[in-house]
Image (tube, rainbow, N blue to C red):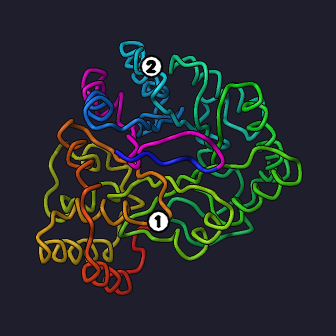
Amino acid sequence: MNMRTIPRTDIKISPLCLGTMIFGEQLDETASHGVMDTAIKECGINFIDTAELYPVPMRKETYGRTDDIIGSWLANNSHLKSSVVIASKVIAYSSGLPWFRGGPRPTKDHFSRSLDASLKRLNVECIDLFQIHWPSRNTPMFGSLQYDPSKEKNELPEQGLNLYEQAEAMNSFIKAGKIRAWGLCNENTWGLMSFLRICKEHSFAYPATLQNAYNLLNRTFEPELHEACHREDVGLLVYSPLAFGHLTGKYLSNPPDHSRLSMYPSLKSRYNSTALCQAVSAYKDLSQTYSLEMVDMALAFVNQQPFVTSNIIGASRPDQVISNVNSLNINLPKPLLKDIEGIHKQYTNPTP
């Protein structure tokens, strides 16, 4: 597997990253370790993505369990520990997660407490990439498209706009050797450029990556963030390349009982529209026209984008890992890509 370099660092990562948000909820420790064995030992993936709030769905009783499972795998495979690159995330703000530090806030103290807890759970001395999970300020996220100034978070310092303190905290963690690089997640162009400006003005380490959703059903990265990341040398880490499983086609009819949205219906809100079903049907027909599995076409489409640094895949079984890795060997032909553009124009971003 050809490795790639996280911008502004010497960190080498695989073009596919193993997402772990189901570890400890949908998968128990043994099953999770099996998926990690296949991804790392058999397939050559060296990049793992986690977060302090995982597993999903978020519950007080389970938060941090994903880290514990990764940490126990690393303890059992100490000879591989130095070669595994770990990305994690801190919650900067939430009004609905009081079990995190009494309610997460975008301060250096909160970030530091989060980082120390993650290091302990993961059983490591340094996290390679530490990311801010979502903006602390009022801004459209998770399917919302319109900015509403009336919803400013007045209880936060400077209404959640204390980006200097957040960037300074990350810079201090790098200097202390607790992290190697930092990044953003679920961020937009204004936020990315604001962080970059602050880092330039104060000689802080720049955010190296941006982790955002990107797939055939959500290409909102392309109009503005693509240019910003390209010009500012920020790598895109893609999450949800299969749009929470919709691009497998399994939700077009009766989904299996073990599917994620069947088990956790509360997660459906971002992927619930008539246009979504119509777009998925169109992509399924297109994949069949070219004798491809829709999953393979969807993953290959993401893999082929020149702005993608790594594609975060999720898998509940070892065979799914192997299948996803095989997508790296698929080169979508130009006529197929042209047809994809036609569908995209007809059903533009039904799951932003």
Horizontal arrangement in the rendering, residue 152 relative to residue 99 (left or right): right
Q: Position of residue 241 (x, y in %)?
A: 37, 57
Judged left or right of residue 223, residue 337 is left
What percent of the width, then of the height, locates residue 137? 72, 55
Residue 202's disc number? none
- Quadrant location of the N terminus in the rendered image: top left
Q: Quadrant of residue 149?
A: bottom right
Residue 323 or 114: which is nearer the viewer?
323
Residue at horizontal 41 percent and vertical 52 percent from the top:
311
Query: Which residues, given as a range, are shown in magenta?
Result: 8-34
Q: For residue 48, say whether it is visible.
A: yes
What's the distance in space between the residues labelled 1 and 2, CA to CA? 33 Å
Amino acid at the residue labelled 1: Pro
In the picture of the structure, the residue carrying the numbered disc 1 is 306
Placement of 163 over or under 80, stated as above or below: below
Q: Secondary structure at mark 1?
A: loop
Amino acid marked by disc 2? Gly
With respect to residue 343, does 263 lie above or below? above
User: Going by the picture, which residue comes out furthest to the right?
Assistant: 201
